[in-house]
Amino acid sequence: IQGNGEFEFSVDGGPWVAQDGQSSLIFSGLEAGEVEVIGRDLGGCATETKLVSLIDYPKFFTPNEDGFNDS
């Protein structure tokens, strides 16, 4: 985002989230798939929208053919 000062972000039209002094945030608990992320500066000078693909993978990979976490 090109702009000055503080920024806030929204994912898929959700609430705007900001932290003092941050130019980026980490969102957790999102489902795998494509999401729309909007960032804007609080001064109203700049807004940017990006489509982001989220992937999911198991915490463990155990290819022992027991049917759990094999692939």
Image (spheres, helix red, strand yellow):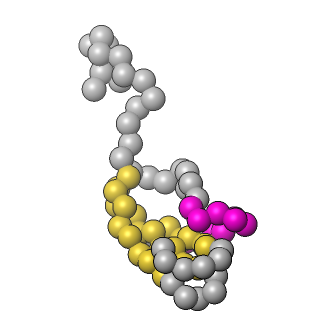
Taking the view exactly as shown, the residue that stands out farthest to the right is: 20
| Residue at image point 56% right, 70% down | 9
Is the C terminus in the top left, top right, bottom left or bottom right quadrant?
A: top left
Magenta region, residue range: 13-24
Residue 51 as seen in the image, left or right of residue 12: left
The answer, for residue 4, to whether it is visible in the render is yes
Q: Position of residue 12 (x, y in %)?
A: 46, 70
- Residue 13 visible in the snapshot: no
Residue located farthest toward the top when viewing the structure as drawn: 64
Instruction: Using the image as rendered, state which of residue 1 and residue 9 is in the foreground.
Output: 1
Tell me the residue at 30%/11% (across/down).
Answer: 64
Q: What kind of secondary structure does the magenta stretch mostly adopt? A: loop
Q: Is residue 56 magenta?
A: no
In the rendered structure, the answer to whether residue 66 lies left or right of residue 10 reads: left
Horizontal placement of 60 versus 4: left or right? left
Tally the numbered discs. 0
The spot of residue 13 in percent (x, y) is 50, 75
Q: Image point 54% across, 50% down: which residue?
A: 29
**Residue shown at the point (54%, 71%) measured from the top left:** 10
Residue 60 figure quarter: top left
- Left/right of residue 8 with respect to residue 71 in the rendered view: right
* Image quadrant in which you'd find residue 66: top left
Frontmost residue, 62 versus 9: 9
Q: Hey, which quadrant is residue 36 in on the image?
A: bottom left
> Is the residue 44 above or below the residue 28 in the image?
below
Above or below residue 3? Residue 54 is above
Q: Position of residue 25 (x, y in %)?
A: 58, 59
